[in-house]
Image: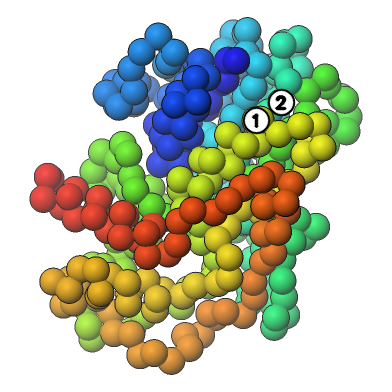
Amino acid sequence: MRVLLTGASGFLAEHILEQLLKEGYFVRATVRSEDKRRAVEKLHTGAMLEVVIVPDVSSPGVFANVVKSIDYVVHTASPFHLSATDMQAEMLDPAIKGTTEILEASAKEEQVKRVVLTSSMAAVIDTPSIPGPAGKVYSEKDWNSVSIEQALAHPAFAYHGSKTFAERAAFDFMERTKPKFDIVILDMPFIYGPMKNQQSLKSLNTSSAVVYSLISSTPSAGVPPTQVPLWVDVRDVARAHVLALKGGPEIGNKRFLIHADGTYTFGQVVDIVKKKFPHLAERLPTQSGAKVDGDGEYSSDNAKSKSELGLAYEYNLEHSITALVEDLLAMETST
Ligand code: NDP
């Protein structure tokens, strides 16, 4: 079976690529530049991998050749940062047009059976109203209410809007064109865990950078509010993508919330780092032990990811944070 994986140089996609190759899939992986192609090929080689350059996922027709002879598509490529200045060009266009371009190209290829879209809980949690109603438990039925005006006005809302509008565009496309393939959408909160291919501490992916900023603090600083009290390990998310490809028609045209059980706080992350890396104590904010504003105000139900997608979550917060901090510290000494 042949899989097209977009955004293969990303933090998450590197893990998806590793699992797909391990399972014996042929993978055509897209990256944006020659440098990124070299970086991907440094980690993975062999006849089952073909790396191709797609500089701009939002260009009309850009996937026409790339999707040829492909059975499954996994579309992860999308900007994830909270510092856009041109919200339309940097965030909304690549996310939304990138999604519709890949769907349009797939619809023209007889062989494509399923497109798995990497979305985010940013498309689910109602971020304009955080923390929202106390005790809210999010599910696959929920949608972020972020408006286009909010998305164009604020970089964080631009990211939330990019994922929300891209998901909506995907469902609209399916409804309007009724292609032969189906889609599966995966919605994750913050993803932590080991990094396979990060080049430098200056270009960390956004979720790893959050943890790096926590361990680059000082005891005189307080633990920042967690805001999104949900997390998941990158290896479990990669597994969810593989399961989404393999699943039967009953999971088609559905979204799944992919996250660890329960909630967490940055205070817990700090405690784990203190325990596993005692020499970092001077670089950690002070954990007061008290509830931090915004923490634990809402939660989410991941039951469908287990019962329908068949995902068994393997990694707890300690596994995930320990692996990530080890990699961050290794990068410090190598740069
Ligand atoms: P990365 O920044 O590591 O990866 C993003 C990938 O998308 C990279 O391959 C990047 O290419 C590519 N990309 C970024 N901007 C564009 C663009 N304008 N056009 C084409 N490609 C682009 O982040 P993650 O691995 O964390 O994110 C991967 C996916 O997972 C994204 O869709 C993100 O929204 C989603 N996600 C991530 C979460 C997290 O906590 N990490 C949580 C929920 C969802 P390049 O390497 O060249 O920059």
Which is more toward the observer, 144 or 289?
289
The type of residue carrying mark 1 is Leu
Instruction: Give above or below for 291 relative to 64.
Output: below
Mark 1 touches mark 2? (CB < 8 Å): yes
Classify 10 Å Cα crowding around label 1: few (below 14), some (14-19), many (20 and above). Answer: many
Name the amino acid, label 2: Arg
- Mark carried by residue 245: 1
Can residue 299 be seen here? The reply is yes
Q: How is the image coloured?
A: rainbow
Find disc 2 in the rendering and name its residue: 114
Label number found at residue 3:
none
- Identify whether 162 is placed above or below 51: below
Of helix, strand and loop, which one carries label 2? strand
Please state, as top left, top right, bottom left or bottom right, where the N terminus lies in the image: top right
Per the image, label 1 sits on a secondary structure element best described as: helix
| Residue 261 rendering spot, x and y as whole percentages | 58, 65
Task: Please tell me which residue is depicted at 88% across the width and 33% down the height of the picture.
Answer: 175
Using the numbered discs, state the Cα–Cα distance from disc 1 to disc 2 in whole angstroms.
Answer: 7 Å
Front-most of residues 197 and 2: 2
Q: Is residue 318 above or below residue 168?
A: below
Q: Position of residue 322 (x, y in %)?
A: 30, 60
Residue 272 is left or right of residue 229, and the answer is: left
Tell me where residue 291 appears, x and y as whole percent.
48, 88
- Residue 147 shown left or right of residue 237 in the figure: right
Q: Residue at x 61, y 53 (%)?
A: 258
Relative to the observer, which residue lies in front, 151 or 145?
145
Q: Residue at x 44, y 26 (%)?
A: 22
Q: Is residue 148 left or right of residue 261?
A: right
